[in-house]
Amino acid sequence: MELMRRWGLAERIRGAGRPGDHPLDIAWVTAVGGHEIHRLDFGTTDTRPAPPCTPEPEQVCPQHWLLPLLAEAVGPGVLPRECRLESFVQDDDQVRATATDLSDGRRLHVNARYLVGCDGAASRVRAALLIAAPTRRRTRVFRNILFRAPRLREQLGPGGAPVYFLTQPPDLRYPLRAMDGRDLYRLTVGDHTSCDALSAVRSAIALETSIEVLSDNVWHLTHRVPERYRQGRVLLAGDAAHTLSPSGGFGMNTGIANAADLGWKPAAELAGWAGPTLLDSYEQERRPVAEHSLAEADGNLRRTLDRRLPTEILLDTAQGARARTELARGIERSGVRREFEVPDMHFGYRYASPVIVPDDVTEYDWCADLVAGGRAPHVWLGPGSSSLDLFGSGFHLVASGSHPDLPGLEAVARAFEVRRVPLGLTRAPAYRSSYALVRPDGHVAWHGAELPVDAGGLVDVVRGGRR
């Protein structure tokens, strides 16, 4: 959502239609409307406190709302959206691609300086490059059942939740999600659940309510991180560059942050100011994040898979109550809150690459401290104005000291100008370091108590070296 704020989309996403009074709780239940085992209380969008570390709290926005907003923001492109890549070849100067317009079957020929494969888990671009992406865990097969239940939210009342983890032995243990906060829901079941979709939904809901099944789709969960993110002028992003369990919700954030890291680097190449190592830094920075996200998501999935569900929890007896109490204790002891509240995973990662000037900081508070390669922290500069609003177009130098080195600032500005690297400058008491140079993606390229004597050397490092 911080990136969406930068791109001018945050408020549109918040206004896409999710009711602000819908609970944000996570509940473990034998069935929706049945016995509740455990609950994490997160309030509602309207009532939760503002987080201290970001101007943009997380937001629930299902894909069928989000994608039209993104498509409208991008605007019409050279290619129609409904097209299929057939093949491509590259040389030292360009990529030549052939595609098919699926609306009329026309063959399309495209010449471009770069090609980015954002074509999903079964990426045709990755396969054509022969980049290996071996699976890290056993592939699992699931069914997603999408359905409408117009009266269910009203029936549940204030005890509703956007996510219900089913604890119904033997097979129902995956989430039932409220997709739009109104009447659209999705139930995930294992592929071994052989009953029809309507029966599966009826088993997951203890209340008598009308249900309309909209779809029942099989999907495969793979855990992959390709061995490379770049080959020549072709790069990988999104699910082409990582696939991981949805447990924890890291997949979309990882993919969007891929775009934020990668987007400004080819732009620098096209503008003529990138050094020879800038594009290589994309893989060096983002691949470790994918590795970490995969491990964290897999741990969340294992917690659900390994949970023992005794049949006694279904009983409406004292024995059943005792079994549910014991299961609740086990759920709480297992650390389930980390699956839904783990800001360090989303904000706290730190890049290490040749285009970042390293520091000697090893222990730090990601929420408040400047560290080389880390996300520049959010600080309120005024009503509704965050330090994060400074970043996004070019590099930005923040001078936080009360007596800035004006000749040094002029030397840094000249060094950027000579190399045609865009730079903004703000004097504001934002950070503990006197000076912080922040990249277009909001990560700290350099910080220090004093400006460097060799301003040109600093610029050459952060833009990827000399040509």
Image (spheres, rainbow, N blue to C red):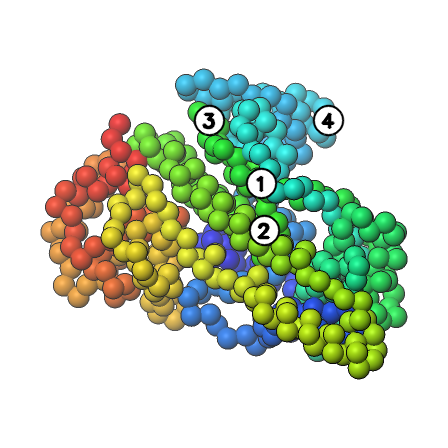
- Mark 4 or mark 1, which is nearer the start of the sequence? 4
Mark 4 or mark 2, whichever is nearer to me = 2
Tag 1 residue: 136
Tag 3 residue: 231
State which tag comes first along the sequence, 2 or 3.
Answer: 3
The reply to whether the C-beta atoms of the residues labelled 1 and 2 are less than 8 Å apart is: yes
Which label belongs to residue 375? none
The one nearer the camera, 379 or 161, is 161
Any mark on residue 104, and which?
4
Cα–Cα gap, marks 2 and 3: 28 Å
Q: Residue at x 43, y 37 (%)?
A: 283
Q: Alpha carbon of mark 4 to alpha carbon of mark 2: how far?
A: 42 Å
Given residues 98 and 143, the one toward you in this image is 143
Which quarter of the figure has residue 26?
bottom right
Q: Element type at marker 4?
A: loop
Q: How far is the residue under mark 4 from the one under mark 3?
A: 32 Å
